[in-house]
Amino acid sequence: MKRTISLMLAVLVVLSSGSAAFGAKVAKPNITAAGAMVYCQNTGEIVYSKNSQKKLEPFSVTKLMTVLLAVQNLPLDKEVTVSAKAASQKEASINLKEGEILTVEDLIYAALLPSGNDAAYALGEAVSGDMETFIALMNKTAKNIGCKKTHFTNPSGMQAKRHYTTASDMMEIVKVALSNDIIRKAAGSTKYTIEKTNKSKKRVLHSHIKFFVR
């Protein structure tokens, strides 16, 4: 999967400390992403916007919706048995094995840090039982959040014809996702260890991005 995301990763939700010198002249940022938004959580102000309504491929930012639904519907210590379909997910993965048992918490970190498509798929199945039902839940939740130009077809962000969002819509998803302490902690982590499982040795996961939520 492409590591360069069309949307500026996590839509640059700005967590202001209140110490900024408001009114100071700031140079316009050089944003090469096709679409982006900078949002100040404290004031609710849209600090910067570029092509905010343009439909774009969200790639792995999709996983924020997947882990949001996981934390809303599953206990972190719930054990999940990886299906053959989940284990077969290509490109970015942590090489899950069919029949491997991990916790929901393990899978959340695996989906967010190394961007594991296999982990995201396993979470979707754990939430809804089958992927078709989970995709429907993703789209229903996006609509409930207020996303008007978003449609998901998979839980990981793999490229697909009808898999798209906008910077504006993704900002709304990010705001909801990062209001959850579990997701904030995972998204702000650079390293996580999955202990030995029934199918694998201990795994040490590292973040593949340089954007961290504090």
Image (cartoon, rainbow, N blue to C red):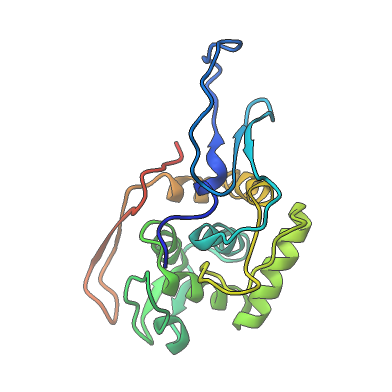
Horizontal arrangement in the rendering, residue 147 relative to residue 65 (left or right):
right
Picture residue at 47% right of the left edge, 67% below the top: 104
Name the quarter where the C terminus is drawn.
top left
Residue 129 appears in the rendering:
no
Image position of 66 with respect to 27: above or below:
below
Image position of 178 with respect to 80: above or below:
above
Residue 87 appears in the rendering:
yes
Give 107 or 56, whichever is nearer the viewer: 56
State the image quarter where residue 107 is shown. bottom left
Picture residue at 75% right of the left edge, 66% below the top: 140
Give 168 or 70, whichever is nearer the viewer: 168
Number of marks in picture:
0
Q: In the rendering, at what x and y percent does residue 109 appear?
A: 41, 59
User: Which residue appears farthest toward the left when viewing the image?
Assistant: 201
Horizontal arrangement in the rendering, residue 119 relative to residue 155 (left or right):
left
Q: In the rendering, at what x and y percent does residue 71 appear?
A: 57, 59
State the image quarter where residue 14 is shown. top right
Picture residue at 53% right of the left edge, 18% below the top: 26
Q: In the rendering, at what x and y percent does residue 177 appear?
A: 59, 50
Give 158 or 51, whichever is nearer the viewer: 51
Picture residue at 55% right of the left edge, 25% below the top: 16
Q: In the rendering, at what x and y percent does residue 96 appear?
A: 35, 78
Name the quarter where the N terminus is drawn.
bottom left
